[in-house]
Image (tube, helix red, strand yellow):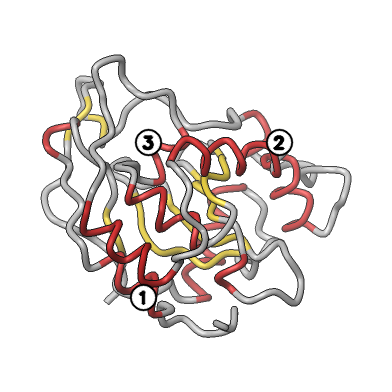
Amino acid sequence: MTSTDGREFPAALAAALVVPFDYDDGDGVDFEPFRAFLAAEDTTDWFRAWTGNPQLTGDAFRVFGQNGAGGYAAFWLVRPGRPLADQPVVVLGSEGETGVVARSLGDLLWLLAGGFGPWEAATDSEPDWTPRPNEAFAAVARKFAPGQELSASEVIAQAAREFPDVDDTIMGTSSGNAEGPAPGTKHGAGPSLLGGCQGRRTTAGECSRPAGPSGPA
């Protein structure tokens, strides 16, 4: 089992994230993995800016990568006493969007094997976008989650069923307020699933892919 305390990737996640993600000018997967979980201080700074609430912390998240628009993918530590591998994976967009895309690390591995990245799983894909099953990710999934095989569509559907109110739950859990977002936060009006530009916006409002990966040193 993997503790939730450290900032090093568990072996299964590390093995998956060394497999290249091919953006392919928007026809592939829009994901840039980090080399380790985002530091605790940086996670809190981000979460406070994301919510507009300086009283919150990012303790409930282990951020492991981002999309081209700067939204984060993270493990959401919502199951007390359970290891990180049993925690759901959430996407937290740069415009305040949220969505749970996998119920566990094992489900995430099979999601990647099915040709989806976190954002492709959380969004309504472009009409001409088609997932490309990836044998390299499938090999990682077979090694680390051999008894959890699901299709990508099953992973996405099961996550949505288990976490139908992810937006309110994230804000309520993180603020210590079970009834929902703390007063004064800017996040509450955001949509519950990501949408729109799958890369950075140019000054003309067009989508563009950033050059090179990013992440903590």
Front-most of 190 and 6? 6
Residue identifier under label 1: 36
Question: Where is residue 170 shown, x and y percent of the image?
Answer: 69, 50
Q: Is residue 52 above or below residue 127?
A: below
Of badges 1 and 3, nearer the viewer stands: 3
Give the residue at the far front of this rendering.
147
Q: Earlier in the sequence, mark 1 or mark 3?
A: 1
Q: Residue at x 28, y 34 (%)?
A: 131
Mark 2 belongs to which amino acid? Pro
Mark 3 belongs to which amino acid? Glu
Question: Where is residue 165 shown, x and y percent of the image?
Answer: 73, 37
Mark 1 belongs to which amino acid? Ala
Residue identifier under label 2: 164
Residue 18's label in the rendered image is none
The residues bearing labels 1 and 3 have C-alpha atoms spaced at a distance of: 22 Å
The residues bearing labels 3 and 2 have C-alpha atoms spaced at a distance of: 18 Å
Q: Residue at x 56, y 60 (%)?
A: 104
Front-most of 21 and 6? 21
- Dividing the picture into quarters, in which one does residue 190 lie? top right
Secondary element at tag 1: loop
Is residue 191 found left or right of 132 in the rendered image? right
Is residue 17 found left or right of 10 in the rendered image? left
Question: Where is residue 213 shown, x and y percent of the image?
Answer: 19, 58
Question: Where is residue 101 shown, x and y percent of the image?
Answer: 52, 45
Give the residue at the far top of this rendering.
127
Residue identifier under label 3: 120
Q: Is residue 20 above or below residue 43?
A: above
